[in-house]
Image (cartoon, rainbow, N blue to C red):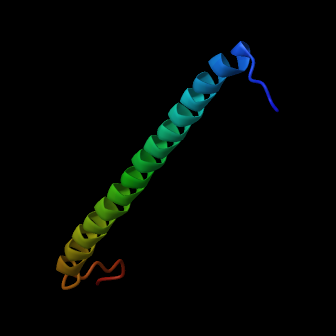
Amino acid sequence: MTTISPTNCKQTPALWWVVTVSLCLAALVISVVTVNIWTGTKGGKIRRKKNLEQNDEDEDEGNYENDV
């Protein structure tokens, strides 16, 4: 038969608290990084689309160095 000493009973809730808080913080960090990356790539597509539209306007203009 195993006996539980008073010191083990006091340490067990503290250990679970540390594990729970650590896991919650890890989940929060992962969520923040994921949202940050997702919004960054979404913003990049908008910027690229604007750059493509601006480049399309300049196609008709000729910029030649050797015009006589």
Outermost residue, front direction?
A: 1
Q: Where is residue 24 in the image (x, y as percent from the top left)?
A: 48, 39
Seen from the viewer's position, the closer of residues 26 and 11 is: 11
Q: Which residue is drawn at 64% across and 26% down?
A: 12
Task: Give the vertical position of 60 relative to 45 (above or below).
Answer: below
In which quadrant will I find the C terminus?
bottom left
Seen from the viewer's position, the closer of residues 49 and 23 is: 23
Q: Where is residue 58 in the image (x, y as percent from the top left)?
A: 21, 77
In which quadrant will I find the N terminus?
top right
Q: Residue at x 28, y 63 (%)?
A: 47
Left or right, 42 with respect to 31, comes to left
Q: Which residue is drawn at 18% across and 85% down?
A: 60
Q: Where is residue 39 in the image (x, y as percent from the top left)?
A: 32, 56
Outermost residue, right direction?
A: 1
Task: Give the vertical position of 9 relative to 48 (above or below).
Answer: above
Seen from the viewer's position, the closer of residues 3 and 48 is: 3
Q: Position of residue 7 (x, y in %)?
A: 72, 14
Q: Which residue is drawn at 59% across and 22% down?
A: 14
